[in-house]
Image (cartoon, rainbow, N blue to C red):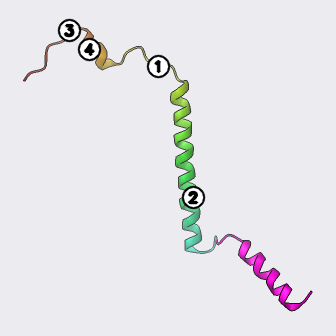
């Protein structure tokens, strides 16, 4: 191997490492973690909302069905 090939291989190894020791690298990791967490939260809550049983009628609908007083104008 020539010196140029060895230098090129060292540069490729260095470039493939994530920059976790810098502020920019840590901010990128934090931002991606936040987006992944938000996506996971939305996905889990959507699944929970889809599989939980729905109530028959909520509290406000029951109040209107009992003939309550008309709202004041």
**Label annotation for residue 67:** 3
Query: Which segment did they paint magenta?
Result: 1-19
- Residue depicted at 9% across the width and 21% down the height: 72
**Residue found at the very far left of the displayed protein:** 73
Left of 25 or right of it: where is 11? right
Crowding around mark 1 (Cα neighbors within 10 Å: few <14, some 14 to 19, many 20+) is few
Answer with the quarter of the image where residue 47 lies: top right
The crowding category of the residue bearing disc 3, from other C-alpha atoms within 10 Å (few below 14, some 14 to 19, many at least 20), is few
List the residue tagged with mark 4: 63
**Residue that numbered label 2 is attached to:** 32
Mark 2 and mark 3: Cα distance apart in space? 53 Å
Q: Secondary structure at mark 2?
A: helix
Under tag 1, what secondary structure?
Answer: loop
Q: Secondary structure at mark 3?
A: loop
User: At x 92% / y 86%, what residue is drawn?
Assistant: 1
Left or right placement of residue 43 versus residue 68 in this view: right
Of the numbered discs 4 and 1, the one sitting upstream in the chain is 1
Residue at the far top: name it: 66
Which residue corresponds to the image point at 53% horizontal and 42% vertical from the top-left?
A: 41
Which of pointers 4 and 2 lies earlier in the amino acid sequence?
Answer: 2
Q: Is residue 2 left or right of residue 34?
A: right
Check if residue 43 falls in the magenta segment. no
Residue 32 is situated, as x and y percent measured from the top left of the image, at 57, 58
3D distance between C-alphas at marks 4 and 2: 46 Å
Q: Badge 2: few (under 14), some or many (20 or more) residues near its Cα, within 10 Å?
A: few
Measured along the vertical axis of the image, is residue 31 above or below residue 13? above
Q: Are marks 1 and 3 in contact (CB under 8 Å)?
A: no
Name the residue carrying label 1: 54
**In the figure, is residue 54 to the left or right of 12?**
left
């Amino acid at each position: 191997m020539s010196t140029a090939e060895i230098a090129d291989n060292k540069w490729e190894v260095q470039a493939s490492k994530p920059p976790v020791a810098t502020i920019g690298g840590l901010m990128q990791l934090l931002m991606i973690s936040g987006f992944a967490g938000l996506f996971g939260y939305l996905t889990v809550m959507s699944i929970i909302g889809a599989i939980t049983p729905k109530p028959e009628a909520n509290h406000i609908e029951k109040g209107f069905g009992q003939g309550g007083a008309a709202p004041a104008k």
